[in-house]
Amino acid sequence: MGHHHEVAVHEEKFVVPARLRNITFGLMGIGLVAIVVGLMTDSHRFWANFLLNNWYFLGVALMGTLFLATQSVSNAGWSAGFKRIPEAMATYLPYAFAGFAIIILSVLMHWNHTYHWTHEGIADPTSPDFDEIIAEKVAYLNLPFMIGRVVVIFTLWYLFSRVMRRNSLAEDLQGGFKMLKRNKTISAIFLPVFAVSWAMACWDFIMSIDTHWYSTIFWVYHFAAAWVTAISIIALTVIYLRRAGYLSIVSEHHMHDLGKFMFAFSIFWTYIWLSQFLLIFYANIPEESIYYQERFEHFKLLFWINLVINFVVPFLLFMTRGSKRNESMMILVGVLLIIGKWIDLYIGIMPGTVGSHAHIGFVEIGMFLGFLGLFTFVFTRSLTKASLVPTKHPYIKEFVTHEVL
Amino acid sequence: MYESPIRRPLITGKTSYAQITDDIATAVEAKPTKWWYIGFIVSLAGLGLWLLTVTYLLVTGVGVWGLNKTVDWGWDITNFVWWVGIGHAGTLISAILLLFRQKWRTAVNRSAEAMTIFAVICAGTYPLLHAGRPWVIYWVFPLPNTYGSLWANFNSPLLWDVFAISTYFTVSLVFWYVGLIPDLATIRDRAEGVRKKIYGLLAFGWNGSAKAWQRFESVSLILAGLATPLVLSVHTIVSMDFATSVIPGWHTTIFPPYFVAGAVFSGFAMVLTLLIIMRKVMRLEAYITLNHIDVMNKIILVTGSIVGSAYITEFFIAWYSAVPFERYAFVNRAFGPYWWAYWAMMTCNVITPQLFWSQKLRRNITAVFIISIFVNIGMWFERFVIIVTSLHRDYLPSSWAMYSPTWVEIGMFVGSLGLFFTLFFLFAKFLPVIAIAEVKSIVKTSAEEHIKKTAEKEGIDIKEVNPQIA
């Protein structure tokens, strides 16, 4: 198929349209109002939402780097042409870190009760607040150790994402194969680093909310959720950029592959969901089943919606080949998954923080929109910083001629 | 389809389509070599041992095993899970790698799938015999019957196993056979007399028309789509045999994905053990290249690391849970009377695969062979550790017990290896061990000669970007 070889690859400079910029400002404005309302009405609710959204977008940003790492170690050519999108997503990391610094500060200042294990006297047998189960865990769950871990973890994530981005941009200037190799090595090292650090971050920030409760699959579950969200955001961004006249080198073949990723990993998320739920439900050990008991009792509607949005709908809609190549369908599924994963996290965080009276109102929606605005602002600004098409990527020719037959 | 010249070649040396047919079909047509006879006779001896021990078992009863009322699962289930695990690489290679369009799949899928089928057959013998009365094994199926309330227990993961494994076996077999059809036709076209008749029958009248190929492609894709969830489901269900219980060390939520990763890990190890010998004995080095071995070693590294991180997660969460029974179960594993099994598992499964960070070792045949054996051993110990150490000291210290296998169990295990290798040797003799048609499909992208040509056309120095090409 020699005629394919001649497709020209040009640099493309993205400019954030004024309308998009105004929308992000508007969203951030709504977020600010929601924060103020939240703080004035119910500060626990505010902090729970603050944690939720920070964690959500931290995951999205980090999965940008993880996506690049997986593509790099597997010598993938099909994703080379839009790699600037996950790269730009990862530039949100410092903002998420700042958010978590605020959360840790709030814990230190006792502004909220998000983490039960940080209570005064919880591990002190003479205190009226003594909790003998938590006392068993203080060797791990204590603030100095936790803060130390988080600092190391965040530093590692930042360094890996920065260096990978820097090498990728350097490749645009110098060409050749050196940067491809270098990023491959860095990516290979990043994968085990990610596994360990992500597991700890999941335990520290999310699992320790329900301090007594534990589940070995927990970090895999959160990986699956964040990964699906990130893939959906990549797919939606590709569609947006194509409609705005960029990334013409992306064809329906690439969209088909992105659709397959969304399809496969929404099933993977369900698989992990089922592994955790079914085993806890079946064995019915009270220490474990209490987790689902609370959620099933007080969050029943969302409990089912979660499965419908994150599994049933994408599964049915993306079953056929044609639907994965249909942009409108992909927008629908992508938006549903982005909302669905927020709901999933909501059910995860709220029972242990706000409690059974938690509900979705202006504060919840407003704060999510605010964070979405901030993320989009940072993300699109980073997209403008380099050519959207990595013209000198060694696999760019494979990308352009990519076909899914 | 264009491929970058920096990708490593998957067929080395001078290649022509006729050459590929000759290289692979000759092995089926020629008389077996001396090595084949030696290997086959040794395997037959193993099969004989299997028949002997199984007959003895059936005549006398399951009491001839070393099980006791505390440790009521021992080598039987260990071997069952071990064999099922090994039966994971083949369908992963043929199905998931097909969906991912991994071209290196083409040279190894046939033999890996065959191995899968034989491993699942070996696995199936254990529950069949463990159930005690294999002649009424059909009772596991929900069949209408006149025995009153006798009906399959749908709440039991053991029943889910029946469905998961029989479905997996069926689909794997169909997938493997469908893939064989065009190659069987090739053998038929070269054969004469009775052989022509037999291969002709097996080839289902394949005529090589465009329509036939088109259907072949779409059925492959459909089967790949069906087989992919099946690969995951089998070991997921096997893990649930343990994880749905309330036994410390068994009841842990990471079991399903971690069992699947472990299964792929052990499956690839067995594929490597077999292929390293096969490519040498059958002179297939040009098709099963060092690059294939390198890639499979990377999969071993990844899945081995997943298994390792699951071990560590389990240990950590056992401590974190603050449940005394959980904590004890894991400490007992590592430092109790079965410590040697635990550390054998940790060494073989966690430490050895990490050696594959080194590209030199990934491409060193001797090292790979030894490491693949280590992984096979390690994964056997993993199942032994999970099953026996969790059972032998239960909630009631007065019933604590030790377990060791009898000669019958050992004989059955060694014998099952005989069964497995007997089947594999027969396969290697009578069927094309490499998918002829599929390997031909990558000549124009991945053959060494083609890559050299592309590099030349683009003015790239091949030695610099692709040192694997001499």
Image (cartoon, coloured by chain):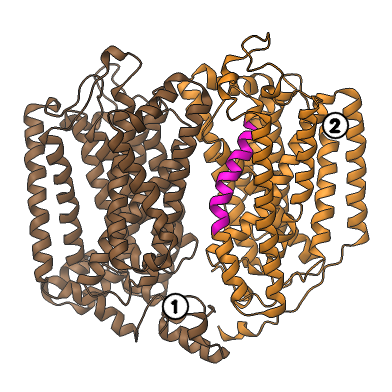
Chain colours: A orange, B brown
The disc at residue B446 is: 1
Nearer the observer, A128 or B55: A128
Location of mark 2 (residue): A363
Q: Are marks 1 and 2 on the same chain?
A: no
Q: Nearer the viewer, residue B328 or B434?
A: B328
Quadrant hosting residue B13: bottom left
Look at the numbered discs 1 and 2 and tell me whether their residues touch, using CB distance below 8 Å.
no
The residue at the point 24 percent across, 31 percent down is B74
Q: Is residue A84 shown left or right of residue B444?
A: right
Q: Secondary structure at mark 2?
A: helix
Identity of the residue drawn at 36% across and 47% down: B349
For residue B231, above or below residue B280: above
Image quadrant holding the N terminus of chain A, namely bottom right
> Counting other residues with Cα less than 10 Å from the Cα at mark 1, is it few (<14), some (14-19), or many (20 or more)?
many
Return the chain for callout 1. B
Front residue of B381/B299: it is B381
Relative to B312, say whether A215 is above or below. above
Q: Which residues are magenta?
A: A189-207
Q: With B69 as the anchor, is A338 left or right in this view?
A: right
Q: Amino acid at mark 1?
A: Ser
Q: How far apart are the two marked residues, 1 and 2, measured between alpha carbons?
A: 56 Å
